[in-house]
Structures are given as C-alpha cells and as structure tokens.
C-alpha cells in the first residue's frame, strides 16, 4: 500500500525532502488530495532557494507532480517560470483536451 502525505503535513514533508536532497521522490507521496498544497509550497520555497540549482529542482518537482496529476495549465505555468521551452513543448504534447490546449495557448500568448 503506498504512503501518502496526510494531515496537512505537506510543508514538513517538503522541508524534509529538501534537506535530504530527495525532492525527486516527492511525487510518489502525492495524490489528488494533497498535490496542490505540495506544489504551491514548493513554488513558494523556490523563491528562497540558496542557488539556481535548488530553485530549478523545486520548480521541476512541482512541474512533475502537476503533470502526473494531469494539471496541465499549472504545469505550464511552472515551466514558464523556469523559462524551459522543452518542458513547455512536453506539457503541450501531453494534453489531449482541446479546451485546455486553447487555454494553454492563451497562456503562452500572454
């Protein structure tokens, strides 16, 4: 049985994963109930990162979680913050919903 982050422990879990340099494993502990809080905390923490590598790792983890949860617009927003054209192309290709694709195209046009 997989273990998930419960009881509003998202900040503590993210902090622990950052300290142990294990952010890449965080996606396995997220589900439909907690992914949003985890990703918002990751993006907020990235603003206070010690260096650009740590900031990129926080954003990339949030991107991966959003993509896994099929939150394509949120993943696109994170990819835009990273200014990563490869991730932008990847998330545009992963989305199959025409309405969501139009919304994402609008986001890119701004």
Image (tube, rainbow, N blue to C red):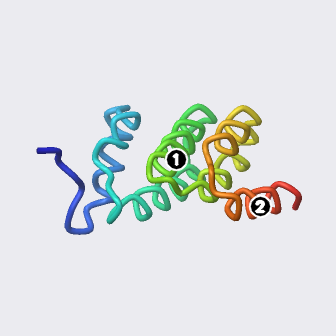
Displayed quadrant of residue 93: top right
Quadrant occupied by the C terminus: bottom right
> Relative to 9, is 54 on the left or the right?
right
Q: Nearer the viewer, residue 54 or 71?
A: 71
Q: What element carries label 1?
A: helix
Displayed quadrant of residue 53: top right
Give the percent coordinates (x, y) of residue 102.
77, 61
Q: Which of 6 and 9 is in front in this view?
A: 6
Query: Label 1 belongs to which residue?
Result: 67
* Earlier residue among tags 1 and 2: 1
Task: Name the residue located 22 percent from the left edge and 52 percent from the top edge.
Answer: 4
Displayed quadrant of residue 21: top left
Eye-nearest disc, 1 or 2: 2
> Relative to 48, is 77 on the left or the right?
right
Categorize mark 2 by other alpha carbons within 10 Å: few (<14), some (14-19), many (20+). Answer: few
Task: Name the residue located 70 percent from the left edge and 58 percent from the top edge.
Answer: 98
Q: Do the residues labelled 1 and 2 touch (CB within 8 Å)?
A: no
Query: Label 2 belongs to which residue?
Result: 102
Quadrant occupied by the N terminus: top left
In the rendered image, the residue lying farthest to the left is: 1
In this rendering, the answer to whether 55 lies above or below 10 is above
Q: What element carries label 2?
A: helix
């Amino acid at each position: 049985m997989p273990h998930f982050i419960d009881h509003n422990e998202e900040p503590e879990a993210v902090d622990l994963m950052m300290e142990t340099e294990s952010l890449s494993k965080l996606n396995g502990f997220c589900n439909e109930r907690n992914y949003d809080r985890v990703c918002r905390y990751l993006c907020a923490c990235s603003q206070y990162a010690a260096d650009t590598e740590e900031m990129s790792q926080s954003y990339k983890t949030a991107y991966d979680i959003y993509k896994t949860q099929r939150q394509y617009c949120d993943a696109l927003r994170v990819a835009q913050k990273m200014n990563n054209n490869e991730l932008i192309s990847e998330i545009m290709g992963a989305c199959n919903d025409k309405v969501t694709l139009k919304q994402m195209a609008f986001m890119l046009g701004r």
